[in-house]
């Protein structure tokens, strides 16, 4: 096998980085780095309060020392006599953060819609994203700071966020997840002490198995073992907002590679995505993640399993006391947990065949919403998802009858 050169690897990393939202990135001048990092201003101040929604910043600490930022958002109606509805915790996907739920207008974005319907909205941000980028003893420059995958996001970050919201509100928490947010939700729900704090869950583009993904670019990168090459090169943090990341994305998008095409090759075709808002999205996305996380996701594609991180036989023995990493057993999710799932026929990541596999292993029969022409991002950033998706999700939450909203 011919080893790819560092430059080739860098170019491929940049390609992959286009993963979510960089499709129309045009020139470095368009890309104003000073808008990205105003550390003094949190997510509330930057994005949520300017739309007129009351928002407060919270912090909580994971078992392994990460300090997570969480935001609490309420209705902008100003009618404080109305009782707050049930707490709902929003769990974002890979390479994005809690801001992703607020990037379209208040009438289009799920975070604002839930707040306006009197839900007590809590916005989760996993470790490594710009809203959760500190640790009690490690610096983000340390290799150990990036030594985690979605397994830790499920068992430490999500667990801690649920516990925090549960303890502040004294109420079972509704969960809404998208993409990687659904992987970590379903993994966490297999843990009895966590799921007992959850009232219901709505999963957009639900993923556990990744055996049948059809997205062209990720499959190519999996085949090239890009994840392993990068780890061997000592690249532990995936940060596409770094100077080199910006530069390379810029070169790719001005050069012969068509950026819109790239986005499609990563996520599948997105029909209702408003591409004239991409510059705005790019002020917030993409957020960093770890190479080990990418490695874990690629293991799922290669091995077809929904299991803990595979360290290789001998190290697995040390970590888990067995040669193969333990599987997350979906049948341990109690059938009493109300589940709702929205999925799309154009989604090249959350494949329908893989979802069938997930459904077969669950004890319960989730309520399903299938939208044939919806792609992976349409469930999050779309001009029509209020009517197509969110209204139905809300009707489901209403049907549970535990709470009344009006
Ligand atoms: C990209 O740059 C070209 C030339 O400067 C311009 O015509 C086009 O509108 C730009 N596209 C976006 C999405 O900014
Ligand atoms: C970048 O954004 C900052 C703050 O919004 C602004 O002051 C500055 O002029 C911008 N720079 C460019 C090159 O657009
Ligand atoms: C948002 O929706 C409300 C209620 O449906 C409507 O009255 C309002 O005009 C909408 N706002 C915008 C900016 O579309
Ligand atoms: C798409 O985004 C542009 C720019 O923000 C906005 O003016 C337009 O109204 C959006 N289209 C829809 C259908 O929401």
Image (cartoon, helix red, strand yellow):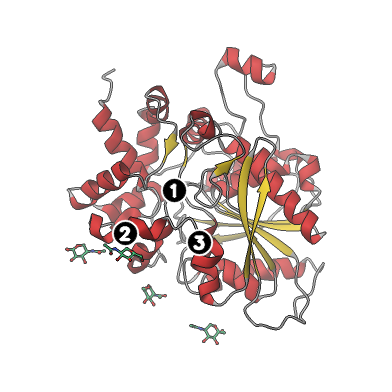
Counting residues from the N terminus, which is met first, the one under dot 2 or under dot 1?
2
The residue sitting at 70% across, 74% down in the picture is 118
Q: Can residue 371 be seen in this view?
A: no
The residue drawn where x is 53% and y is 50% is 93
**Discs 3/1, front:** 3
Distance Cα–Cα, label 2 vs label 1: 31 Å
Residue carrying label 2? 32
| Residue 401 position within the rendered picture, expressed as x and y whole percent measured from the top left | 81, 69
Q: Residues within 10 Å of mark 2 (few under 14, many from 20)?
A: few
Judged left or right of residue 49, residue 78 is: right
Quarter of the figure with the C terminus? bottom right
Residue 130 coordinates in the image, percent (x, y): 49, 50
Badge number at residue 178: none
Choose between 227 and 27: the one closer to the eye: 27
Q: Name the residue located 62 percent from the left edge and 68 percent from the top edge.
A: 55
Q: Which of 324 and 358 is in front in this view?
A: 324
Quick one: SS at disc 3? Answer: loop
Mark sitting on residue 348: 1
- Work out whether residue 320 or residue 244 is closer to the camera in this orientation and state it: 244
Q: Mark 3 points at which residue?
A: 41
Q: Which of 17 and 189 is in front in this view?
A: 17
- The percent coordinates of residue 266 (x first, y second) are 38, 47
Give the Cα separation between the discs numbered 3 and 1: 36 Å
Q: Which residue reaches farthest left?
A: 256
Is tag 3's residue or tag 1's residue first in the polypeptide sequence? 3
Q: In which quarter of the image is ligand 2?
A: bottom left
Q: Residue furthest top?
A: 314
Tell me the quadrant of the picture where the N terminus can be found: top left
**Is the shortest distance between ligand 2 and the CB of mark 2 under 8 Å?**
yes
């Amino acid at each position: 096998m011919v080893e790819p050169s560092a430059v080739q690897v860098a170019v491929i990393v940049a390609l992959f980085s286009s993963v979510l939202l960089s499709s129309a990135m045009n020139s470095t001048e368009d890309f104003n780095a000073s808008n990205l990092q105003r550390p003094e201003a949190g997510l509330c101040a930057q994005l949520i309060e300017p739309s007129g929604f009351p928002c407060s910043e919270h912090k909580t600490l994971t078992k392994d020392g990460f300090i997570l930022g969480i935001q609490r958002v309420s209705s902008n109606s100003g009618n404080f006599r109305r009782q707050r509805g049930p707490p709902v915790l929003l769990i974002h996907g890979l390479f994005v953060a809690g801001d992703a739920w607020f990037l379209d207008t208040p009438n289009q974005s799920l975070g604002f819609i839930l707040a306006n319907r009197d839900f007590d909205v809590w916005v989760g941000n996993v470790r490594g994203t710009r809203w959760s980028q500190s640790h009690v003893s490690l610096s983000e420059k340390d290799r150990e700071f990036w030594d985690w995958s979605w397994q830790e996001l499920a068992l430490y970050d999500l667990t801690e966020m649920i516990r925090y919201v549960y303890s502040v509100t004294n109420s079972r928490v509704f969960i809404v997840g998208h993409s990687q947010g659904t992987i970590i939700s379903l993994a966490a729900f297999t843990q009895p002490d966590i799921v007992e704090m959850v009232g219901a869950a709505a999963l957009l583009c639900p993923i556990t198995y990744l055996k049948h993904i059809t997205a062209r670019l990720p499959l190519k990168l999996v085949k090239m073992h890009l994840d392993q090459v990068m780890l061997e090169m000592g690249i532990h943090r995936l940060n596409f907002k770094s100077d080199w990341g910006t530069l390379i994305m810029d070169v790719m998008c001005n050069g012969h590679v068509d950026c819109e095409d790239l986005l499609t090759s990563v996520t599948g075709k997105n029909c209702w995505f408003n591409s004239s808002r991409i510059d705005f999205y790019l002020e917030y996305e993409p957020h960093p993640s770890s190479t080990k996380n990418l490695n874990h996701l690629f293991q799922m594609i290669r091995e077809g399993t929904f299991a803990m991180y595979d360290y290789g036989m001998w190290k697995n023995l040390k970590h888990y006391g067995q040669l193969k990493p333990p599987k997350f057993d979906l049948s341990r999710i109690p059938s009493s947990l109300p589940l709702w799932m929205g999925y799309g026929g154009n989604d090249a990541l959350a494949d329908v065949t893989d979802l069938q596999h997930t459904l077969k292993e669950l004890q319960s029969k989730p309520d399903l919403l299938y939208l044939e022409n919806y792609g992976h991002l349409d469930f999050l950033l779309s001009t029509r998802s209020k009517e197509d998706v969110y209204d139905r999700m809300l009707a489901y939450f209403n049907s549970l009858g535990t709470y009344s909203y009006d």
